[in-house]
Amino acid sequence: MAKSSFEYVKSYELDDTLLPNTWIVVRIDGKCFHKFAEHHNFTKPNDLRALNLMNYAAYQVMKDTHDICVAFGQSDEYSFIFNKNTAFYKRRGAKLLTTINSKFSSSYVFYWRKFFGDEILQYPPCFDGRIVLYPSAENVIDYLKWRQADVHINNLYNTAFWALVLQGNLSPGQAEKRLCGTVSADKNELLFKEFNINYNKEKEIFKRGTILLKLHVQLDVKKKTVASIIDIHEDMLKEKFWLKYENLLEP
Ligand code: ATP
Ligand code: ATP
Ligand code: MG
Ligand code: MG
Ligand code: MG
Ligand code: MG
């Protein structure tokens, strides 16, 4: 087709190619999910249906996008880590981020009923997204540890907070005051002594979030392998995790 006189406008589009040879991390996060959780009667402090739906939406993303080596999810957020040398969308930032975010968001809605059954989705949820680039594997590992440490801090606090409110009959304000200035050991003790809750026995998915990773399984003697995506809830803050999954970031 001949070029039209309008076509010059295309030149206003800026190049957004992401730096080569770096790990691309895409993180998405639900918008106003403290409200969304209330509007959809999420169980406090952790709604398993919601976590499973997040995981399933992330699985849909990962299944479609072969260059994602690992993903990590907790609460209303998910991080996707691309292979260092990915050429996905020629590393064009906007294409990459919007495609991941949109696939995740539409999957969240599309599979809502599979996890929430009769709980009606009241309005279309919305997720924001960002891209961060990391130059070293060590940085990516620290990134994952940072997100997982966040789960632990929040979950311990929330577990104590909701025990005080739901079982201890404190008002949210009183519960907040009660927890003000306490360290982890205090919260563990409070849970155990006052509510007979052993925090160590809480579900792993609540304490550690979910790691989605690709396992390369050998199918037959001809050494044909297929990648299957599995979900685990292991402790990435422990060095033995990184020994066990030594090829996680450099498959
Ligand atoms: P923002 O738009 O800035 O992200 P937000 O309200 O989504 O605001 P976040 O810091 O992202 O704030 O926190 C998400 C909130 O969503 C949690 O604090 C919690 O109230 C709720 N939430 C998310 N997932 C769950 C879940 N599985 N079970 C219970 N509550 C959840
Ligand atoms: P890409 O992923 O690169 O965007 P694409 O297949 O979506 O690839 P586009 O250039 O965006 O390519 O073109 C969208 C195509 O979708 C159209 O060429 C047409 O085939 C189809 N399409 C979109 N909307 C309609 C419509 N309303 N009726 C019929 N076909 C449509
Ligand atoms: Mg946010
Ligand atoms: Mg949020
Ligand atoms: Mg969040
Ligand atoms: Mg198109």
Image (spheres, rainbow, N blue to C red):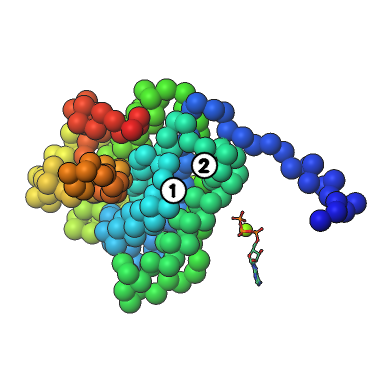
- Residue 40, can we see it? no
> In which quadrant of this rendering is ligand 6 seen?
bottom right
Q: Residue 240 location in percent, x, y?
A: 18, 28
Q: Mark 1 and mark 2 in contact (Cβ < 8 Å)?
A: yes
Q: What residue type is labelled 1?
A: Thr
234 horizontally vs 50: left or right: left
Q: Is label 2 within 8 A of ligand 2 (CB to nearest ligand atom)?
A: no
Indicate the quadrant containing the N terminus: top left, top right, bottom left or bottom right. Answer: bottom right
Secondary element at image label 2:
helix
Q: Name the residue under label 1.
A: 65
Q: Name the residue under label 2.
A: 88
- Residue 243, can we see it? yes
Q: Residue at x 82, y 47 (%)?
A: 9
Q: Residue 151 location in percent, x, y?
A: 31, 41
Q: Which amino acid does label 2 sit on?
A: Phe
**Of callouts 2 and 1, the N-terminal one:** 1
Q: Which residue is drawn at 18% across and 33% down?
A: 185
Query: Which residue lies most toward the right here?
Result: 5
Q: Residue at x 24, y 32 (%)?
A: 245
